[in-house]
Image (cartoon, grey):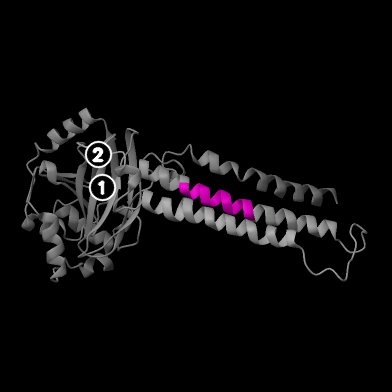
Amino acid sequence: MFTRKWQQLRWVRYVALAPLLLFLNGCATHSIWWIFDPRGVGAKASFDYMMIDVVVMLGIVGLTGIMIVWFMWRYHKGKNRGTYDGKWAHSTTIEVFVWGIPIVAVGFLSWAVAINGSFAVNPYNPTVITRHMKPHGNPIEVDVIATDWQWLFIYPQYHMAVANELVVPAHTPVFFKLTSTAVTTDFFVPQLLGMIDVMPGMRTKDALESDSIGQYQGVAADYCGAGTSWMLFKTHVLSKDDFASWVHHAQQSTGNLSIAGFNRFAEPYININNKIEYFSRVQKGLFNQVILEVMHGRKWPLPMFMTENMVGYLKKQAAEHRA
């Protein structure tokens, strides 16, 4: 008997300690709880609106749960804790309570989250970023092209591009235009900005601004083929001086990205070694040219050999010096 009770208490102890995993996980270098540690203006706003929604709904669900338990205790048959009135039919107080709280909650969430939140974090025009822009500020523009399976970041203002690494200055709005060459995927930097679809032959938009200098993980947040697991990129938020130095360094590279060069770059490639490439010269209008080519049927075929023998394909990549 004693052993059985001890085993039951042990399970209770484990259940009680389980919530601590949420806090301990925050100590991990690559935490799965990125979304709970926003470092961008847009990500912080999204987190705040999500928490408002969660708190309001938990308030309703929690109050309902408490009332259910109280009713079960208060009106338990045979306990003589309440009286039975067979003629009772209506209570204005209960009607106001039961209908009033949901109406107020829905009205508040509609105003606070659905309306204000939608405009604040709208990826095409996030007011949480644009309303703080200086009249003569200098936002950064970045054209993003997803291939199978790499990310290409073009900086039109600097006539340069970098593959598989995103670098942006702190305290500066960054506006993205995004497209894909082959399949739909998602562009996502959990701590900096929300997830947005990236689709072939189409253009989507997103924006970020961060005051927190550091390195953040970017991912392709949708399955898009054999190389999805390695379709990652580091996002570096630098001071303005460090960003200017990085741009100068990138502009010293010998890479040249014309449309023909891009067609070679866009061939299916599994980036298992986190390869980063710099291109100091980029053909003007390359982003729009890629969209037009995809719209007119341009494809970068996936070799059947890759799906049949991925290890063999990776060896082939290495032999061609693409590893």
What is the magenta range?
A: 49-60
Q: In this view, does 135 lie above or below 228?
A: above
319 left or right of 169 in image: left
Main secondary structure along the magenta-highlighted residues: helix
Mark 1 = which residue? 273
* 239 and 89: which is toward the camera: 89
Closer to us: mark 2 or mark 1?
2
Within 10 Å of the Cα at label 1, are there few (<14), some (14-19), or many (20+) other Cα atoms? few
Q: Position of residue 278 (x, y in %)?
A: 14, 43
Q: Where is residue 258 in the image (x, y as percent from the top left)?
A: 6, 53
22 left or right of 93 in image: left
Q: Is mark 1 on a helix, strand or loop?
A: loop
Q: As shown in the figure, which amino acid type bears the numbered disc 1? A: Asn
Q: What element carries label 2?
A: strand
Label 2 vs label 1: CA separation? 23 Å
Within 10 Å of the Cα at label 2, are there few (<14), some (14-19), or many (20+) other Cα atoms? many
Residue sitting at the far top: 241
Q: Which residue is drawn at 72% across and 46% down?
A: 10
Q: Is residue 155 magenta?
A: no
Q: Which residue is drawn at 63% across and 56% down?
A: 101
177 left or right of 251 in image: right
Q: As shown in the figure, which amino acid type bears the numbered disc 2? A: Val
Q: Position of residue 244 (x, y in %)?
A: 17, 32
Q: In which quarter of the image is residue 71?
A: bottom right
Give me the disc on residue 188: none
223 left or right of 89 in image: left
Q: Which residue is drawn at 22% across and 37% down?
A: 135
* 320 and 75: which is toward the camera: 75
Mark 2 = which residue? 168
* 150 and 179: which is toward the camera: 179
Q: Is residue 55 magenta?
A: yes
Pick whichever of labels 2 and 1 is earlier in the sequence. 2
